[in-house]
Image (cartoon, grey):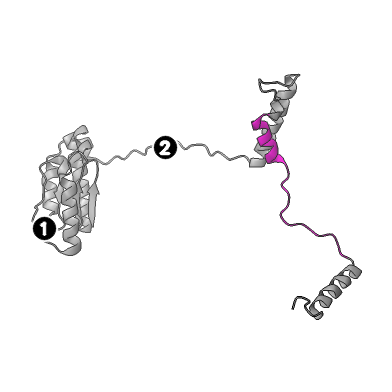
Amino acid sequence: MIVVVTKADLVNERSEQAMDKVLCDVRRFCLQYGAALVYTTTKNPKNTQLLAKYIVHRAYGLPFTTSAQMIDRDTIFVPAGWDSEKKIEIVRSNITEIDVLEPNREKVNVAKEPEVIAEDTQAFLTRFADMLAKDSATNGQKNVDDAGTTASDSPLASFFSNLLKDKPQSTRTAAPVSDEQQQAQIEKIFQKSVEPDSAA
């Protein structure tokens, strides 16, 4: 298992004490699961290449001779099995700010977004068509544009009116057939099957 911390160049924006605290917590997590730790950044591809070599080493058993790197904060590399609780405590002992060491005990209240219920499509289209009809009625006269079309002939109005029209049903019901008509159809089919084929 490998823990990869991306955008490691952002460590320079925080205080050293805060980043040491984060580093101790992440290293302790990696130690618990026997994982390697790699900090990567796109500004310095050195550790990205190191990560690729380490993955090949772990997956295929190829030789890997790079040792742990703890000096440069944005290119930290801790191979699996290298770290120990004593090494983590050395870094932790250098953290002097009390508020950095203490976990945040305050609960952060997160404002919940109100749930928005979507309106039924047909109800919306009906309401919108009514609004269009009222708008054209309040004008008193139909607006005529340069092309000579009225507001009710506009593409938007015709689009919504087409959506509101009842769609034809795909299944059609046949008119009821009387028993006599059914019998006549059956006799025709029977006669065609009995008659010799004239084309043969």
Q: Earlier in the sequence, mark 2 or mark 1?
A: 1
Residue 10 versus residue 59 in the image, above or below: above
Q: Amino acid at mark 1?
A: Phe
For disc 1, the neighbor class at 10 Å (few under 14, some 14 to 19, many from 20) is few
- Image position, residue 86 (x, y; %): 11, 51
- Which residue is rendered at x = 17% and y = 40% of the image? 44
- Which residue is rendered at x = 67% and y = 29% of the image? 154
Q: 146 or 128: which is nearer to us?
A: 146
Q: Identify the image quadrant of the N terminus.
A: bottom left
Give the left or right position of residue 106, taking residue 63 as reference: right
**Quadrant position of residue 162:** top right
- Which residue is rendered at x = 76% and y = 57% of the image? 172
Q: Which residue is mark 1?
A: 64
Q: Which residue is mark 2?
A: 110
Q: Nearer the viewer, mark 2 or mark 1?
A: 1
- Image position, residue 134 (x, y; %): 72, 26
Q: Secondary structure at mark 1?
A: loop
Q: 133 or 21: which is nearer to us?
A: 133
Residue span colored magenta: 154-177
Q: Amino acid at mark 2?
A: Val
